[in-house]
Image: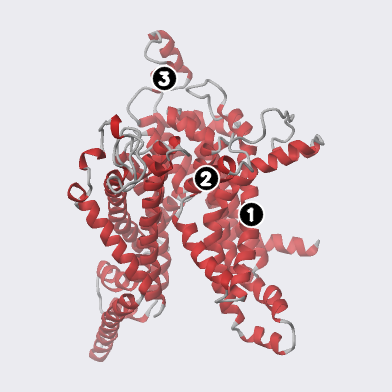
Amino acid sequence: MKKVKNLFSQIYRSYLFRRTIISFLSLLGLSLIIFALARVIPGDPARMALGPRAPEDVVERYREMLHLKDPLIVQYYYWLSDLFHGRLGISLVTFRDVSADILEFLPATLELMLFTAIIQIIGTIILGTISGCRPGSLVDGALRIFAYVGITIPAFVWAILFQLIFSYYLGWLPAVGRISEDLRVPRVTGFMLIDTILTGNVRAFIDALQHLILPSLSLALGAMAQEARILRSSLVENIGKDYVVTFASHGIPYRTVCFKYALKPSLLGLVPVMGLDIASIIANAFMVEMIFNWPGVSRYGITAMLRKDLNAIVGVVLVVGLIYVIVNILVDILIFILDPRIRRR
Amino acid sequence: MKAEDFQLSEEIIRKEREMRRESIKRAWYRFSRSKLSMTGLIILLAIIISALFAEYIAPYPSHAGLYINFRDAYQPPSLRHLMGTDMYGRDVFSRVIFGYRYALMMVGMVLSIVVPVGTVLGLLAGYYRGRWIEHLIMRLADIFVSVPPLVLALSICSILEPNVFNAMLAVTLMWWPWYTRMVYSLASSLRNEPYVWAAKALGVRDINIMFRELLPNMLGPILTKATLDASWVVLIGAAISFLGLGAQPPTPDLGTMISEYSAYLPQYWWMSLGPASALALLILAFNFLGDGIRDVFAGE
């Protein structure tokens, strides 16, 4: 307990606290920029929403409703006070509540992100450790090629490729969606994997898992290839260090030295890279969700962008920014806990 | 200041410049000896030349834009059509060569604005640490990095009109903070080097210290980042047009082509294979080159 308390006071005194505040203030700044951009573009949002045939008095009333006649800063004030009440306005196309829509689609994206992160971390550690402990081996050579392939092929091309191979030609995994049409899973948390367990539906659980594999794999591959290369090079560097040689001279088997003692410090340097990659999953999700017809926030965002639904766009950008910032802060905290050198600074 | 001090200061600065010149020579030597980076350079040069002279190199230049010839539609790859033809009978290979033009234009425009602007802002913020200008620049940069670049670029494209030019504009707007942040951290550590103090003691103007003392010492990291970033710009540009928020058909943009042609998978696989592998080749070339440049500067 005391240890935890100590850690908290350290966090409070450190740069972490300052950075967290700056991050949230930046989000506020972001909201101002994107809001201003959405309002100053040529064209009348009210007219755009209601269409050219709507009578003028209806459009006029709609303008009043959206406060479009007030100065920009007053509009922003209304919008901001709505934001702090958890309202992001009404979609200009579907007339639905944007925050309700986003809340409905958010769990699907978070589930995809989490699953991708797990695949990414496990894959990176396995590939990086094997090739780092045996430099020059067959696996190492394969990883080298895989790393370049991973960088050069964008996530959306992976997605199309996987869909083609595993769903169309082999027929092993479903091509689109989150769950098969015939399965009905009542919504509890919105996370399909959790909901299926809670309702005790094993068949639906396996089905949901199958739907998750291809999208998350195509999201994970690029970052995984790069991270495994980074892990490999830092492992190779650490294995050459004196303390590892000492362990080896004490008769500790190479495998133990490698997987236990050299891996730990090598992973530390990887955490920031991994953190940024995991936070960036949500950006690539914009393409992958579209291809796999995954009912998440990113697909909602793209649909809004294609229809020029300004309120929904602003909402999605803010929510994505929020997730991005939160993941980055969590990673900072994790580094803070893992690395005693930073704590002493 | 005494005459000896003056001489000493000048000596420090002169030595530092000499070392820099010497290291550039060595860098080029190391770069030209690395197979990977030379491969990257050659591929990239070939792509640039074919994009520049697309009208003469592409077998069917008229197929780049709107062109319809249903008789030749859906042809698999052959000697006449290296990457096959699409649903309108256009030669995919010709379109890919024209597609490189848009990809390279994007890289050229984005980097030629972002690198200088980002560098200057980073220099200002790093050199004037603790003043209001640092806070202004860095907090503004914080705002732009609080959301993934692709997402903000996509939304800017959609709020403005989706087309090639706006896509470039959006990516440019997104990219400068990453340079500013890097140059900022380099500048704030370099400003305490002896040669900077020496220049200050000589009464060299701030602007000359920034551009003639600090900047040349950061060229390595900036150049490395620019080359590696070039591949990211290509990727993001392709992603934007893939999602329909950048170039619109019939513009022969690689991302637009992939999205257009992927509707004809799996039967007419060659249509999407052409632009997708062309995209991969360009990204690979930039990565080889960037890795080579990084190794050159890391060796110092």
What percent of the width, then of the height, locates residue A141? Answer: 53, 70
Considering only vertical position in the picture, is B203 above or below B152? below
Q: Is residue A77 visible?
A: no
Q: Chain of mark 3?
A: A
Classify the position of the N terminus of chain A by image quarter: bottom right
The residue nearer to you, when weighing A158 against B17, is A158
Residue corresponding to mark 3: A46
Whether labels 1 and 2 belong to a single chain: the reply is yes
* The disc label shown at residue A119, or none: 1
Q: Amino acid at mark 1?
A: Ile
Q: CA distance from mark 1 to mark 3?
A: 45 Å
What residue do we see at 73% from left, 30% from top?
A185
Identify which residue, A150 or B31, lies in the foreground: A150
| Vertical position of residue A226 compared to residue A278: above or below | below
Observer-side mark, 1 or 3, equals: 1
- Residue at (37%, 14%) from the top-left corner? A52
Q: Say which residue label 2 marks.
A: A159
